[in-house]
RNA sequence: GCGGGCAUAGUUUAAUGGCAAAACUCCUGUUUUCCAAACAGGUAUCGUCGGUUCGAUUCCGUCUGCCCGCUCCA
C-alpha cells in the first residue's frame, strides 16, 4: 500500500515548516518529545482555516447537522462500553533472539506430556491447523529427546495463559529454542490520568482516543433538546490522544492530534450503502474545495473479512503523501453498534420514536472521521513546489512556493509599498492594510527589495500580493499592482475590485 | 519495543584533540521605480549527561530526538 518516493520532499517540508513557522517540534529546547508538535504563527492560521472551512461546510451551511463540543476526559465506562479499554490493549511478546514480536493472543503453546511427565513445551502461531502443528512438534520433541512412552494429545493454550514458570521453557516460534520469549506486555494506546485527589484504581480516567464517543454519549441530549429529525448528524472538532508505539512521518501519526468527526444518524431501514457512498463523495468534494488535487486522492475499500466487528463497510480516502499512499479520511458505516453498546452499558435506551411506524428505533450511523493534522500535512505536501525562474538577464533561480487554496491560505493578501522611504506610498499602503484586515488575514511588509518580498510570500503560500507603486499615487484611478502567486502575472486592480476578488475566492 | 544510520547558527552544509567556517534566512540601518540587488552591523554555551585527556564539538559510553527497516496503528 505504501511506496517510498522523493524522500527529500519530506525533509524539505519539515525544514520549510520550521523555517517559516508552520510546525515546530514540541518542547524543542528540552530535546523534543516524540510524537508531539507545536504550530507556529503561519501553521496555526492554516490549521484554523482548515477547521473553520470544515465547520462552515459541515455544520453551518447544512440544515441537517448540528455541532457539539464534548469533554476530553469522559466517564471511564464510556471507553469500556465502546470497546476501547479491551480492544485498544494488545498483549505483545518479544523474542529476544530473533527480535520478532508476536501478539500473545495469536501465539499458542502446549506442554508435551509423556506418561504423565512433562518433557518440554512446543509453540506455534495461530493458523488453520494450530493443533496439528503443535502435535507434530510434540512428536518431534519426543523423538529428539529419545523419550519412551505414550505421548498425550496436546492441550493448546494461548500464550497469555502461560505462567511465569512456563514462559522460560516455551520455545520461540522463530528459533525453536526456549528462553528467549518475554512475558506478554500490554500496550494500551489510551493515555491514563487520575481524576480527583486520590491516585488509585477508582480514580483512573482516560484522555479520549477519538472524539466520536462524545456524539454517541450526547445523542439523547441533542435529539431531546433540538429539533433534529432523522436523518441528521452531530459533528465535533477536538483533540484526541493515542499513545502510539511508533509515532512516524512528522505530523502524520502523532500522539496528540485533532479530529473532525461527524456521526450521521439514519433510520434503521434506510439504504445505508447509498448514504455511505454519498458521504464519501461529499468528503472527496470537500478535499478538492480546499485545493487537494485529484491526482493525489484515491479510495481504499476495506475488504469485508478485515472489517472491524462493528463495521458494515469502511472506505478510506487515501492521499499520496511523500512517504506513500496513506489514509486521510475514513468513512465507516457503523450500524447501530455504538448506541446499542451505550444503551446496554448505561441502562438508558438510546432510541428515537418513529412517527411512521409508531415504533422506537435505534438509528444506524455513517461516520466520516478525519484528522486536521493529516489534512494540513496533505495541503503542505500537495502545495509545495520548487520552480526554476529565469530573470531578465537569463539567470535561473529557484523559487519555493506553497500553492495553498485561498480558502485556507494563512495570509490572503500581502500589502507591499514599492519603497519604504516614500511616505506617499507607505501611507496609501497602510490605509489599504487597515481596511483589509477588518475582514481578512493580511500582512504588511516594507522590508527589502520588492522581489524578495514576493518570494517571502510565496513561501508562506499567500495567493496575492498588492503593491502600491508610483502609478497608484501619480495616475488617476487609484490602482495597485496585483501579483498572482502561481503565475507571477501582474495586473492593475482597484480597491473595489480587490475586495470583490477576495469575496469570490475566500469563503 | 528491536536493528541500522544521523545530531555543528533559524535553514542547508564544512572543518578540527588546542580562538568553529560558509551560503541563504532573520533582525537593525543606508539605499532601492516590480520578482531572493548592494553596503555596514548583529545572531552558536557544536542535542543531553558522564568518561578518557593537560585540554573533547571532535574519541568512548548513557539518555533524548530525527531518518530508514521491523513491530504497532481497536
Image (spheres, coloured by chain):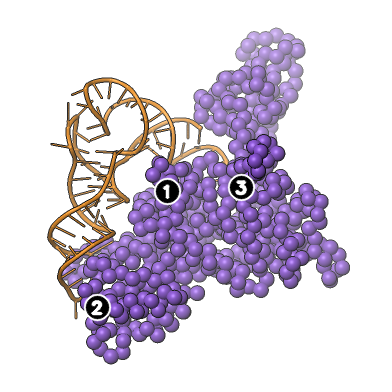
Chain colours: A purple, B orange
In the picture of the structure, the residue carrying the numbered disc 2 is A423
Q: In which chain is the residue bearing label 1? A: A
Which of these two is toward me, A425 or A85?
A: A425
Q: Residue A409 location in percent, x, y?
A: 43, 67
Q: In 3D space, how far apart are the residues under numbered discs 3 and 2 (Cα atoms)?
A: 55 Å
Mark 1 secondary-structure assignment: strand
In the picture of the structure, the residue carrying the numbered disc 3 is A207
Mark 2 secondary-structure assignment: helix
Q: In which chain is the residue bearing label 2? A: A
Q: How crowded is mark 2: few (under 14 residues within 10 Å), some or many (20 or more)?
A: few
Q: Are marks 1 and 2 on the same chain?
A: yes
Name the residue located 53 percent from the left edge and 68 percent from the top edge: A53
Q: Residues within 10 Å of mark 3 (few under 14, many from 20)?
A: some
Q: Which mark is residue A25?
A: 1
Asked whether residue A212 appears in the rendered view, the answer is: no
N-terminal-most mark, 1 or 2: 1
Amino acid at each position: 500500500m505504501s511506496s517510498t518516493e522523493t524522500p527529500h520532499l519530506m525533509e524539505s517540508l519539515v525544514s520549510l515548516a520550521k523555517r517559516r513557522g508552520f510546525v515546530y517540534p514540541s518542547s524543542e529546547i528540552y530535546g523534543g518529545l516524540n510524537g508531539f508538535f507545536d504550530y507556529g504563527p503561519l501553521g496555526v492560521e492554516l490549521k484554523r482555516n482548515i477547521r473553520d472551512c470544515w465547520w462552515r461546510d459541515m455544520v453551518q451551511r447544512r440544515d441537517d447537522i448540528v455541532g457539539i463540543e464534548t469533554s476530553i476526559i469522559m466517564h471511564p465506562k464510556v471507553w469500556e462500553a465502546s470497546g476501547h479499554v479491551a480492544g485498544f490493549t494488545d498483549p505483545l511478546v518479544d523474542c529476544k533472539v530473533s527480535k520478532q514480536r508476536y501478539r500473545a493472543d495469536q501465539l499458542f503453546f502446549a506442554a508435551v506430556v509423556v506418561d504423565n511427565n512433562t518433557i518440554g513445551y512446543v509453540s506455534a502461531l495461530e493458523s488453520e491447523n494450530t493443533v496439528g502443528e503443535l502435535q507434530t512438534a510434540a512428536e518431534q520433541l519426543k523423538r529428539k529427546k529419545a523419550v519412551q512412552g505414550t505421548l498425550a494429545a496436546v492441550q493448546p493454550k494461548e500464550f497469555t495463559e502461560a505462567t511465569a514458570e512456563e514462559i522460560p521453557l516455551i520455545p520461540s516460534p522463530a528459533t525453536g529454542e526456549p528462553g528467549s520469549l518475554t512475558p506478554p506486555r500490554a500496550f494500551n494506546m489510551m493515555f491514563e490520568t487520575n481524576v480527583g485527589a486520590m491516585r488509585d484504581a477508582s480514580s483512573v480516567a482516560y484522555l479520549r482516543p477519538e472524539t466520536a464517543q462524545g456524539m454517541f454519549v450526547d445523542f439523547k441530549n441533542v435529539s431531546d433538546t433540538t429539533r433534529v429529525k432523522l436523518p441528521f448528524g452531530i459533528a465535533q472538532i477536538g483533540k484526541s490522544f493515542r499513545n502510539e508505539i511508533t509515532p512516524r512521518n512528522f505530523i502524520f501519526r502523532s500522539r496528540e492530534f485533532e479530529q473532525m468527526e461527524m456521526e450521521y444518524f439514519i433510520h434503521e431501514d434506510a439504504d445505508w450503502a447509498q448514504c455511505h457512498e454519498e458521504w464519501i463523495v461529499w468528503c472527496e468534494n470537500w478535499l478538492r474545495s480546499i485545493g487537494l488535487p485529484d491526482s493525489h486522492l484515491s479510495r481504499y475499500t476495506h475488504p469485508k473479512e478485515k472489517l472491524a466487528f462493528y463495521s458494515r463497510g469502511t472506505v478510506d480516502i487515501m492521499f499520496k503523501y511523500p512517504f506513500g499512499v496513506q489514509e486521510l479520511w475514513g468513512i465507516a458505516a457503523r450500524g447501530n453498534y455504538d448506541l446499542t453498546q451505550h444503551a446496554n452499558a448505561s441502562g438508558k435506551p438510546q432510541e428515537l420514536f418513529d412517527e411512521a411506524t409508531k415504533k422506537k428505533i435505534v438509528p444506524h450511523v455513517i461516520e466520516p472521521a478525519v484528522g486536521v493534522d493529516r489534512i494540513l500535512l496533505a495541503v503542505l505536501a500537495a502545495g509545495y513546489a520548487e520552480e526554476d525562474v529565469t530573470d531578465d538577464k537569463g539567470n535561473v533561480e529557484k523559487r519555493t512556493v506553497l500553492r495553498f487554496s485561498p480558502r485556507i491560505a494563512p495570509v490572503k493578501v500581502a500589502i507591499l509599498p514599492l519603497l519604504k522611504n516614500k511616505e506617499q506610498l507607505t501611507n496609501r499602503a497602510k490605509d489599504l492594510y487597515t481596511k483589509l484586515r477588518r475582514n481578512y488575514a493580511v500582512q504588511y511588509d516594507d522590508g527589502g527589495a520588492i522581489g524578495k518580498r514576493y518570494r517571502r510570500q510565496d513561501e508562506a503560500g499567500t495567493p496575492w500580493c498588492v503593491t502600491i507603486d508610483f502609478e497608484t499615487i501619480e495616475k488617476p484611478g487609484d490602482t495597485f499592482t496585483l501579483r498572482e502567486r502561481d503565475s507571477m502575472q501582474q495586473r492593475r486592480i482597484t480597491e473595489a475590485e480587490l475586495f470583490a476578488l477576495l469575496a469570490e475566492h475566500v469563503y
